[in-house]
Image (tube, rainbow, N blue to C red):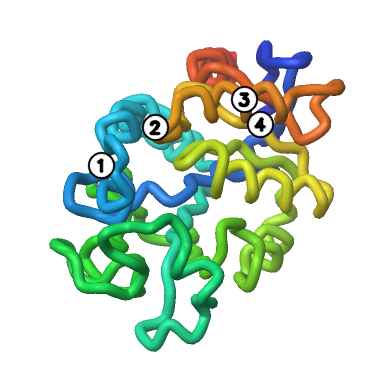
């Protein structure tokens, strides 16, 4: 049975079918969320990102219960760093660079403890996990093919950081023909003003990149559909 969701969003209402929509969770990794990781090595307050975890959990739980497709991404690199160009590794003037040994293993390297998704949002069996060497979820990954296999047409986004990997992934998705919605309270930046600016950019000009909405609107629509 097709389950259609309709709810208020900006710049106008959003509609999707659970069976043709994926929840894409961007880079909720220990290196970004927890103290001692890459994010903190850049001088950032990781507590800002950790604050969205409860809202993300609520959405993930509801989406799983509805049987919707879940995609998790991890920004990660091969141990030899062959997929990490100097233009990326040398940016930011951090105390620790990608590949360096940190408190949770080598920074942003596949298989290292800090590169794993936080326990609160740990992927379940059969959920898609994408390791991406870039900021966008589609660059040099099999994500497009995996979505096509399931005839996915629309994407719901949450994760970090809003203005970098989340926005990049949404723009990549938009270029590939997906309608995208960003859950406002399920994304965050180390710089709150950057999040605000990104939300405005995404929904500007009639939703040039996509829609935004509070997670409560989605959850209410899911509850309504379940009780129909």
Which mark is first along the chain, 3 or 1? Answer: 1
Residue 12, position in %: x, y?
78, 14
First-in-chain label (4 vs 2): 2
Element type where label 4 sits in the image: strand
What residue do we see at 50% from left, 64% from top? 130
Nearer to us in this view, 98 or 57: 98
Please tell me whether mark 1 sits on a helix, a strand or a loop.
helix
Label 1 vs 4, first from the N-terminus: 1
* Residue at numbered disc 4: 181
Residue 7 image point, x, y percent: 66, 15
Where is 36 relative to 183, above or below? below
* Residue identified by numbered label 2: 56
Which residue bears the numbered disc 1?
Answer: 120
Q: Name the residue at the left extreme.
A: 103
Q: Nearer the viewer, mark 3 or mark 4?
A: 3
Q: Residue at x 65, y 66 (%)?
A: 139
User: Is label 3 in a helix, a strand or a loop?
Assistant: helix
- Give residue 116's quadrant in the image: bottom left
Horizontal arrangement in the rendering, residue 166 relative to residue 203 (left or right): left
């Amino acid at each position: 049975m097709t389950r259609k969701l309709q709810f208020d969003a900006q710049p106008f209402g959003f509609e999707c079918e659970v069976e043709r929509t994926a929840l894409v969770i961007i880079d909720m990794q220990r290196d970004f969320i927890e103290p001692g990781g890459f994010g903190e090595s850049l001088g950032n307050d990781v507590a800002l990102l950790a604050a969205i975890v409860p809202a993300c959990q609520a959405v993930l739980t509801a989406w799983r219960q509805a049987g919707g497709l879940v995609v998790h991404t991890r920004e990660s690199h091969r141990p030899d760093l062959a997929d990490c160009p100097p233009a990326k590794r040398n940016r930011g003037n951090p105390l620790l660079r990608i590949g360096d040994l940190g408190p949770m293993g080598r920074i942003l390297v596949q298989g290292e403890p800090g590169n794993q998704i936080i326990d609160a949002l740990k992927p379940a069996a059969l959920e898609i996990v994408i390791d991406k060497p870039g900021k966008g979820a589609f660059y040099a990954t099999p994500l497009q093919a995996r979505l096509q296999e399931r005839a996915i047409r629309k994407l719901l986004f949450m994760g970090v950081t809003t203005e970098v990997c989340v926005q990049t992934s949404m723009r990549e998705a938009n270029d590939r023909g997906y309608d995208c919605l960003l859950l406002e309270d399920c994304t965050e930046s180390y710089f709150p003003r950057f999040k605000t600016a990104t939300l405005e950019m995404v929904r500007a000009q009639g939703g040039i990149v996509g829609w935004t909405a509070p997670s409560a609107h989605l959850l209410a629509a899911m509850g309504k559909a379940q009780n129909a």
